[in-house]
Image: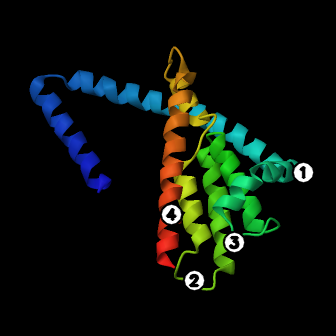
Amino acid sequence: MLNIIWPIFLIISIIFSFFSGNLKALNNSFFESTESAVKLCLTLLGTMCLWSGVMKIVSNTSLINKITKILSPFMKLLFPKMKKRDEAYEQISMNVVANILGLGNAATPLGLKAMETMQKENAQKDRLTDEMATLIVLNTASIQIIPTTVIAIRSSLCSNNPTIIIFPVWIATICAAIAGISAVKFFIKIGK
């Protein structure tokens, strides 16, 4: 759908600028926009590389065991059927940590890996398990303590205070997670 909407917007803006005599302003805005898009991509790339590297180091050290132990009470509540020694349990823990650090780009591959691992153990391959549904909702809600990506974007756009959004992000993501997980647990309970 966006493949249709964006070209229509571009064509309308070109026609409008031609008839209103603002073709030069449109041309300038195209070049300024592409320049700022490249700068933003480079800023985000640096942030993603840094935190993805940190997550890779954490996953290859004993720190993952400590993180898993800290998250254990929440994980037991959210994923009661999973065993602590499961590979998926560890992958979900890493996914949660990446989301907490605001690293959606690092969390996505970890979440996909966890889903693949859980799918291997799934008896009904055409249906989601309760744990898989919970992971999808938890990953989508993305509880963030440090919204790294948003702070990087605000910083690259010369915000006076790029970290001012931290408290509202806490409220929004925690409320989204509580609502989503409550809904999943409710539907799991009535589905049985």
Please state which amino acid type lies under the numbered disc 1: Ser
Q: Of the two numbered discs 1 and 2 on the same chain, state the one appearing first in sequence.
A: 1
Please state which amino acid type lies under the numbered disc 3: Lys
Q: Of the two numbered discs 3 and 1 on the same chain, state the one appearing first in sequence.
A: 1
Dot 2: what SS?
Answer: loop
Q: Nearer the viewer, residue 52 or 35?
A: 52
Question: Answer yes or no: do the residues labelled 3 and 1 have beta carbons within 8 Å?
Answer: no
Q: Is residue 98 left or right of residue 6?
A: right
Residue at the (14%, 32%) spot, across then down = 16
Furthest toward the bottom, the residue is 123
The disc at residue 62 is 1
Q: Nearer the viewer, residue 46 or 94?
A: 94
Q: Of the two numbered discs 4 and 3 on the same chain, state the one appearing first in sequence.
A: 3
Please state which amino acid type lies under the numbered disc 2: Lys
Judge the density around disc 2: few (<14), some (14-19), many (≥20) Cα neighbours within 10 Å.
few
Relative to 71, residue 145 above or below: above
**Label 2, label 3: how far apart the Cα atoms are:** 18 Å
The disc at residue 81 is 3
Instruction: Answer whether residue 41 is visible to the viewer in this image.
Output: no
Which of label 2 and label 4 is nearer to you?
4
Residue 90 place in picture, x, y as percent: 76, 60
Which of label 3 and label 1 is nearer to you?
3
Question: Answer yes or no: do the residues labelled 1 and 2 have beta carbons within 8 Å?
Answer: no
Judge the density around disc 3: few (<14), some (14-19), many (≥20) Cα neighbours within 10 Å.
few
Please state which amino acid type lies under the numbered disc 4: Val
Query: Which residue is tagged 2?
Result: 125
